Image (cartoon, rainbow, N blue to C red):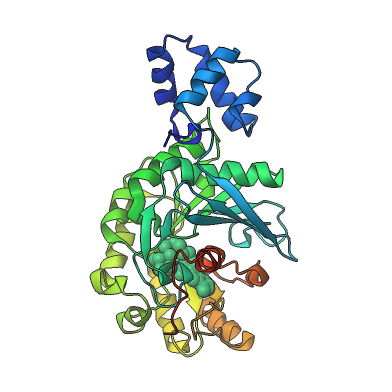
Amino acid sequence: MLPALTGISPEKLAAWFKESGEPAFRADQILEWVWKKKVTSIDAMTNLPAALREKLKESFRLSALEHSTTQGSADTTRKFLFRLHDGRYVESVLIPANPALYGEKSDRRTLCVSSQVGCAYGCKFCASGLAGFTRNLDAAEIAGQVLAAEQLSGERVDSLVFMGMGEPLANLEHLLAAIALITGPKTLHLGARHLTISTSGLVPQIKQLAEHPQQIRLAISLHGATDEVRQQIMPVNKKWPVAELFESLNYWNSKKTQKLTLEYILINGINDSLEQAAILSRHARRLGAKVNLIPYNTVEGLEWKRPPNAHCRAFQEVLKQAGVTANLRLEKGHDIDAACGQLRLKQETSEGIIPAPAKR
Ligand code: SAH
Ligand code: SF4
């Protein structure tokens, strides 16, 4: 399998040109075609000599992703499904605005990006974890989702959330290579402050990422304010319980200026008691974190449900009364299975790549 140009750093491309005896400015021309003009074929790089285009095609593919389908929804959220070279699928969701970051009236677009095929962490409510873990995505497959979403929509992506399929911190090496491409001036050039990594709470990697020089944002999938509640639904809590997780978040705060985000899915009768809300508000205050409340998005094959809206509001009210910034996200894209992992699950199940999820 030839490497994809969308995964090659400017430094590596420059080195390739040097080795091939081509003038160095050609590397910059190619970066311009790939990342700024966003061409969809090497043949479209019209200011390159034909012989060089042929040579390039012998050594590289342009992209690592083949667009499979797009689902649109009433609120203009779009979900793109991509086929990978090994026949597996990943998805990215383009969301018209990220109210948590920019306020309800913004026209900014956020892309929700996948980092792995499947996920090894097996949270009991999540479609991505349902069929287990297959493999990590490489830098071209991660950064390529942003480029492809811009090509397919004709719109500029303003911010990214690594909240698609997979646990990004379990794929830190490729994630950081992709982030270098996404933020680099010669490549996509998005500000690091517009990137949010979401994690289920991998303590060593949180500490490692805290040392990273860029001001990338971090969101923690908490979903339970105590070990008792959290470990019922998130097996990762056995390895890194709440106290250890918070210790790593204190460390994060000592290194970073951006506020942390605590994500909290509301699942009816599981983690939505007002007592959990009170404990959650104490955690959030201690960490200076804001809280995103996400009413649970139903997953085919799982029995979990979202609480009634009035209860979600009561949960939010406890946090607000305690002085915590708490967004209640009336989820966009609910009608197209926006909780990541679901479209891919349907596609791979229908092709017989993975068995249909058993009822739990
Ligand atoms: N593995 C990382 C990132 C991917 S999941 C993490 O867990 O943080 C992104 C977010 O979607 C997480 O907060 C996850 O808990 C949430 N999520 C998963 N399934 C969901 C569902 N059915 N409804 C609502 N949110 C869901
Ligand atoms: Fe994996 Fe995140 Fe889903 Fe948990 S919530 S199974 S960590 S993708």
Q: Residue 95 sits in which quadrant?
A: bottom right
Percent x, y of residue 235: 31, 74
Tell me the quadrant of the picture where the C terminus can be found.
Answer: bottom left
In the image, is residue 318 above or below residue 15? Answer: below
- Is 306 in front, or is 214? 306
Count of picture labels:
0
Give the residue displayed 55% in from the left and 35% down from the top. Answer: 189
In the image, is residue 52 above or below residue 265? Answer: above
Left or right of residue 23, residue 100 in this image: right
Percent x, y of residue 188: 55, 35
Tell me the quadrant of the picture where the N terminus can be found.
Answer: top left
Give the residue displayed 26% in from the left and 56% down from the top. Answer: 204
Percent x, y of residue 218: 43, 56
In this view, which residue lies farthest toward the right?
74
Percent x, y of residue 167: 39, 59
- Is 339 in front, or is 101? 339
- Does the image show residue 221? no
Give the residue displayed 39% in from the left and 19% down from the top. Answer: 15
- Is 147 in front, or is 279? 147
Q: Residue 262 sits in which quadrant?
A: bottom left
In this view, which residue lies farthest toward the front?
352
- Does the image show residue 121? yes
Give the residue displayed 37% in from the left and 59% down from the top. Answer: 134
Left or right of residue 73, residue 166 in this image: left
